[in-house]
Image (cartoon, rainbow, N blue to C red):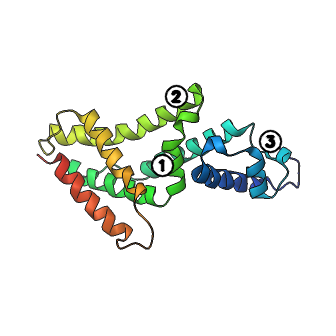
Amino acid sequence: MARTAGSHSDITGPKVRAAALTLFARHGYAAVSMRQIAAEVGVQVGALYNYTADKQALLFSLLKGHMDDLLAARAAMPPTGTPMARLEAFTRFHIRFHLERPEAVFISYMELRNLTPAHFKAIEDLRRQYETALEDILKDGHAAGVFAVPDTKIATLGLIAMLTGVNTWYRTGGRLSQDQVAEIYWDMTRKAVAA
């Protein structure tokens, strides 16, 4: 929505998104009201509608923003090298990207059920783009005889589930660094697909 001159939309807009992200991750989308988001930001409830049409639009914006960031970051990595090198780069990228955004990852998986059908389809289309990048690597490796994956689609979904699962247990300051976790997950990924 249009903001008046001199407004603080560049400050308040991101605060609204950050508050919604934290509250949705902590309490769940259904349990969070626009009033709670407004209180967290320090604005009146009515002011939120200068930044979002409603709570559903806010959820969709968060999930789409996460996927847009993921796809943009992935696109910045040119797909060069052997299929094995590309798979390693993908694995390490996925772990790093997701560990740095635990709340966004959590709501991106747990709150899909709360999207309208049109919003759900838009997010699924973006997810499919990301999955295709990994499946293309697996197909190339299978064709080269480097990977033994009888069904690249199932392997893609299984690997992404495994890699994203790191967010369910990893805690900053734990016994393993992000680099150590990425190394372990790369070893598991390599062994899962190696011919």
Q: Residues within 10 Å of mark 1 (few under 14, many from 20)?
A: some
Instruction: Identify the element where label 3 is drawn.
Output: loop
Q: Which mark is residue 70?
A: 1
Q: Nearer the viewer, mark 1 or mark 3?
A: 3
Q: Is residue 82 visible?
A: no
Q: Is residue 105 visible?
A: yes
Coordinates of residue 34 in the picture (x, y in percent) = 75, 45
Instruction: Identify the element where label 2 is drawn.
Output: helix
Q: Residues within 10 Å of mark 3 (few under 14, many from 20)?
A: few
Instruction: Quote the CA–CA distance across marks 2 and 3.
Output: 24 Å
Coordinates of residue 171 in the picture (x, y in percent) = 44, 66
In this rendering, would 193 be left or right of 65?
left
CB-based contact (under 8 Å), mark 1 and mark 3: no
Q: Tell me which amino acid carries mark 3.
A: Tyr
Relative to residue 103, is residue 110 depicted above or below?
A: above
Q: Which residue is mark 3?
A: 49
Coordinates of residue 175 in the picture (x, y in percent) = 35, 74
Instruction: Quote the CA–CA distance across marks 2 and 1.
Output: 17 Å
Instruction: Identify the element where label 1 is drawn.
Output: helix
- Give whichever of 45, 79 is nearer the camera: 45
Q: Which residue is mark 2?
A: 121
Who comes first in sequence, dot 1 or dot 3? 3
Residue at 28%, 33% in the rendered image: 153
Instruction: Quote the CA–CA distance across marks 1 and 3.
Output: 27 Å
Q: Residues within 10 Å of mark 2 (few under 14, many from 20)?
A: few
In what quadrant of the picture does the C terminus appear? top left
CB-based contact (under 8 Å), mark 2 and mark 1: no
Who comes first in sequence, dot 2 or dot 1? 1
Q: Tell me which amino acid carries mark 1.
A: Leu
In this rendering, would 92 be left or right of 112?
left
Who comes first in sequence, dot 2 or dot 3? 3
Q: Nearer the viewer, mark 2 or mark 1?
A: 2
